[in-house]
Image (spheres, grey):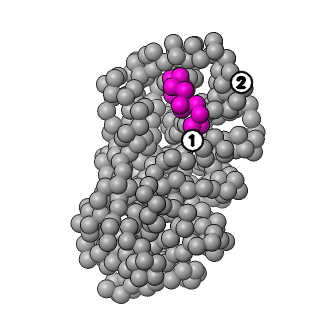
Amino acid sequence: MPLTSFRFDPSLIREFIDFGYSLYRIDARWIPPFRRTIALRLSPDYFFYKKTGNDHRHFLAHQGRRVVGRVSAMVNAALKDGDGTALGLIGFFECVEDPAVATALLDAARDWLCTEHGLRRIWGPMNFDTWHGYRFRTKGFDLAPFYGEPDNKPYYPDQFERYGFTRRRTWNSIEIRGRLQLEALIVGGKEQYDLLVDRGYRFVPADGLDFRTGMEKLYPLITQSFAGFLGSTPIAFEEFQSLFGSMKRALALPMSVFIYDETNRLVAFTITFYELSSAVRAMKGRENPLSLANFFFHRRKVRRINFFAGGKIPEEQAKGHGLGRAGLYYVVDQALRRGYEDIIFALMAKENRVQTFFHRSGQEAQREYVLYELKT
């Protein structure tokens, strides 16, 4: 099968992007990514390509004149496994349901990583790093995707596993609907919250801050909190702000919280989004006056939120004060006060201790996601 490899060829980049849209076009539940965002991330001006030691190669598979698959092989010089081993990455994977096409694409990406860079351990899917898109959805395909969720064809995990990839880590999402179920989740949380408030902790919603100030506060918190996570890499403030700037319209500021300890030190945060899948879907991957009008029309109807992330700096984590439970209580309580009784608790690592809160209240995950690893 003929494969075309390239880096920054404009016409091939256009084919690369267009294939993603043609593959999902008939799926009414698909949330089209913004074309301008993808084009920027594949252009030589993007942050990734300017970092010393980084490299990449894109591949397109054709049957006749028709594109039937795409993949990128990437080297992020800052990305290491937990034992210090350098890693290769496979990302931007899209493919028709044909094992031969998938094998050809993965062969090309693997061979380039091995021969050009000597890499023998590969993660995928991952676009650049964990700050960008990564993981396949592996369960929950009967459910419509939510905004910010990994979205892929149901057969992709099988294509990776047949090739020899094994699971490196697993995450899940839990959606809870109804006031009674949400109140059951936070039983005991109010007591912990009150204890911390009595001690001098403050829970401050982000709606009192302008966006730039909020990003300046969040940046050191989130980079410290996630420093020990699998695949964590440093990120400059400008890139961090660019990534979160694209999500600005989705932020549920009254339920996104900065938490200060008794010394007035900023020690923890939560990030909550309005679940804007229908509003973003209505934009059809475009950013023009008509698509923005469609976005705001659908946004007014949103009654579901997405508890996206929370974290604590290492010093606070070591105290064991139950801040996680208190923060969960605060966000859910604020959501209920505002009439939101449908919450997605998104993309939680299966070994995360927060999972115990859900198990105790009888809640089970409806969606699952996997990052794969290949050793050559």
* Above-or-below relation of 318 to 138: above
Q: Amino acid at mark 2?
A: Thr
**Where is residue 317 drawn, in percent x and y?**
54, 32
Q: Which residue is mark 1?
A: 225
Disc 1 element: helix
Q: Report if residue 317 lies within the magenta region.
A: yes
Proximity of marks 1 and 2: CB atoms separated by less than 8 Å = no
* Category of crowding for the residue at label 2, using alpha-carbon neighbours closer than 10 angstroms: few (below 14), some (14–19), many (at least 20): few
Q: Where does the magenta region start and end? A: 313-324
* Above-or-below relation of 155 to 174: below
Q: Nearer the viewer, residue 52 or 176?
A: 52
In this picture, residue 252 sits left or right of residue 86: right
Q: Earlier in the sequence, mark 1 or mark 2?
A: 1
Looking at the rendered image, the quarter that the C terminus falls into is bottom left
**Where is residue 287 drawn, in percent x and y?**
63, 58
Q: Which residue is mark 2?
A: 263
Looking at the rendered image, the quarter that the N terminus falls into is bottom left
